[in-house]
Image: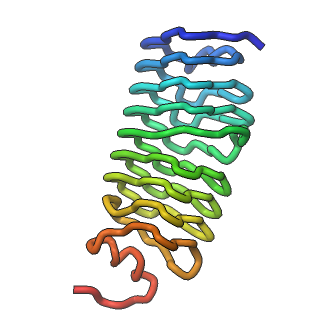
Amino acid sequence: MDYIEEEIFENQDFLTANLPKAEYDNCRFVNCTFANSDLSNVIFFECEFDSCDLSNVKVNNTAFRDVQFKSCKMLGIAFQDCNKLLLSFAFTDCMLNLSSFYQLKLKAIQFVNCQLHEVDFAEADLNQSSFANCDLAGAVFDYTNLEKADLSLASNYSIHPESNKIKKAKFSVQGLAGLLQQYDIVIK
C-alpha cells in the first residue's frame, strides 16, 4: 500500500476515479467531492477534511485515526463498517443525516454545530462525548452509553432513560422534554 504524507488535495472530484488506496498521514482534503465513492481499506491518520462532500461513501475497513471533519456533507455513511482499531474522529459544522455509528466505541467524541437527523447511535459507547449545538431530530439512542456525555446545548433529541445509560450526562432544562417524550406527558 502506498504511503502519502502531508499532501493537500484541493478541489478534486473523486466521483469518477476513486481516491487511490493508500495510507494518508497528515493530509488535508479541501473542497473535494467523494460522494458515492469507495474509500474501503484506506487509512487516514491525523488527516483533515474541510468542506468536502462524503455522502454515501463506502468505508468498509477504512481506518480513521485522529481525523477532523469540518463543514462536510456526510449523508448516509455506515461508520460501523470502519476499521475499529484506534478509531478516532471529530466533527465540526457537518451534516451527518442518516449516518450510522451502530455499536461503535466513540468515547469522548466531539460533535460541534452538526446536523444529526436520523443518525443511528444504537448500542454505541458515547461516554464523555459532546454534542454542542447539534440538532438530533430523529436520532436513535437505544442501549447507548451516554454516561457523562454533554447534551446541554443539543436540541430535538428523544432519549429513553430506561433503555440508555445516562448517569451524569448533562442536559438543559429545555431539553428535558426529550427525556420524557415516551411517557406521553404534557410539559408546559
Please tell me which residue is depicted at 54% across the width and 31% down the height of the picture. Answer: 67
Q: Which residue is painted at 73% across and 10% down in the image?
A: 2
Q: Position of residue 59 (x, y in %)?
A: 66, 35
The residue nearer to you, when weighing 58 against 26, is: 26
Residue 32 placement (x, y as % from top left): 46, 19
Q: Nearer the viewer, residue 24 or 20?
A: 24
Horizontal side, residue 43 vs residue 72: left or right: right
Q: Nearer the viewer, residue 97 or 123?
A: 123
Residue 165 sits above or below residue 68 on the image: below
Horizontal arrangement in the rendering, residue 100 relative to residue 75 (left or right): right
- Please state the total of marks drawn on the protein image: 0
In the rendered image, the residue lying farthest to the left is 188
Quadrant in which the N terminus appears: top right
Q: Quadrant of residue 141?
A: bottom right
The image shows residue 67, relative to residue 161, as above or below, that is above
The part of the image, by quadrant, that contains residue 178 is bottom left
x, y percent for residue 78: 63, 45
User: In the rendered view of the protein, which quadrant contains the C terminus?
Assistant: bottom left
Rendering coords of residue 54 (x, y %): 51, 31
Please determine whether, in this image, residue 96 is positioned above or below residue 17: below
The way the protein has been coloured in the rendering is rainbow
- At a point 64% along the width and 56% down the height, the residue shown is 102
Please give the name of the residue rendered at 40% of the width and 89% of the height, measured from the top-left corner. Answer: 184
Looking at the image, the residue that sits furthest to the right is 1
| Nearest the eye: 162 or 127 | 127
